[in-house]
Image (cartoon, rainbow, N blue to C red):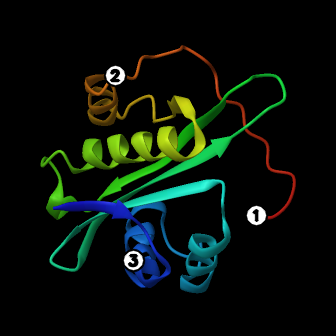
C-alpha cells in the first residue's frame, strides 16, 4: 500500500469514496478536481494499491494572527471497508502530519470525530491524539 498526495487524476475515485463516506450529492468530480488543483490550504493524502484508492485523509492548514505558528485540522479520514484494519488510516494521517510539518511548518494538529465513534477514537489516541473536551458548535446560514 502506497500513501501519497492526491492529484487531479484521482478525482473520479475520490468522488466514489467520498460518496461512501459523506453521502450522495455532496460534491462533483469537477469540484474535486478543481479543489485538488487550486486549494493551497488543503492537503489530501490517498492510500493506493494496484491503482485503486483505498482511502483518503484531508487536512486544512490554518493560520491566525493570534498565534505564531500554523496548525492543521485533520478534517476527513476515510478508508473503504474492504481495506480496513490494515493501519491505512494511521499511515495516511502520519503522512499528512509529516507533509504539513515539512511544507507549512505546522506542528500542531487537531481533529474531530463522533462521540460514539469509539473505533476512530482508539485509532487517534494510538497515534498520539488526546481529548481536549471542547464543544463543537455549528451554524448554517445559507442552503439546505
Between 100 and 8, which is closer to the camera in this rendering? Answer: 100
| Residue 53 against residue 128 in the figure, above or below | below
Mark 1, residue position: 144
Across and down, in percent, residue 49 comes to 17, 70
| Residue 17 against residue 77 in the figure, above or below | below
Q: Earlier in the sequence, mark 2 or mark 3?
A: 3
Between 141 and 91, which is closer to the camera in this rendering? Answer: 91
Query: How many numbered tags mark residues here?
Result: 3
Q: Secondary structure at mark 3?
A: helix
Q: Label 1 vs label 3: CA separation?
A: 23 Å
Q: In percent of the image, x 45 and y 77: which residue is there?
A: 15
Mark 2, residue position: 128
Q: In percent of the image, x 34 and y 30: which residue is there?
A: 124
Q: In percent of the image, x 36 and y 35: which residue is there?
A: 117
Across and down, in percent, residue 1 comes to 15, 61
Q: Secondary structure at mark 2?
A: loop
Q: Earlier in the sequence, mark 1 or mark 3?
A: 3
Q: Quadrant of residue 135?
A: top right
Q: Label 2 vs label 3: CA separation?
A: 30 Å
| Residue 87 against residue 55 in the figure, above or below | above
Between 56 and 140, which is closer to the camera in this rendering? Answer: 56
Q: Label 2 vs label 1: CA separation?
A: 36 Å
Mark 3, residue position: 16
User: Given this view, does label 2 or label 3 mark the residue nearer the observer?
Assistant: 2
Q: In percent of the image, x 25 and y 25: which residue is there?
A: 126
* Quadrant showing the C terminus: bottom right
Q: Is residue 23 left or right of residue 88?
A: right
User: Given this view, does label 2 or label 1 mark the residue nearer the observer?
Assistant: 2
Q: Is residue 143 left or right of residue 95?
A: right
User: Given this view, does label 1 or label 3 mark the residue nearer the observer?
Assistant: 3
Amino acid at each position: 500500500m502506497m500513501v501519497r498526495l492526491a492529484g487531479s487524476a484521482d478525482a473520479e475515485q475520490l468522488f466514489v469514496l467520498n460518496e461512501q463516506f459523506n453521502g450522495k450529492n455532496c460534491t462533483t468530480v469537477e469540484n474535486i478536481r478543481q479543489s485538488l488543483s487550486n486549494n493551497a490550504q488543503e492537503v489530501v493524502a490517498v492510500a493506493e494499491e494496484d491503482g485503486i484508492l483505498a482511502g483518503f485523509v484531508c487536512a486544512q492548514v490554518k493560520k491566525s494572527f493570534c498565534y505564531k505558528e500554523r496548525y492543521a485540522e485533520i478534517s476527513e479520514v476515510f478508508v473503504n471497508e474492504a481495506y480496513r484494519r490494515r493501519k491505512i488510516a494511521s499511515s495516511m494521517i502520519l503522512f499528512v502530519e509529516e507533509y504539513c510539518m515539512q511544507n507549512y511548518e505546522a506542528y500542531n494538529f487537531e481533529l474531530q470525530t463522533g462521540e460514539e465513534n469509539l473505533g476512530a477514537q482508539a485509532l487517534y489516541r494510538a497515534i498520539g491524539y488526546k481529548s481536549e473536551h471542547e464543544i463543537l458548535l455549528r451554524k448554517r446560514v445559507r442552503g439546505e
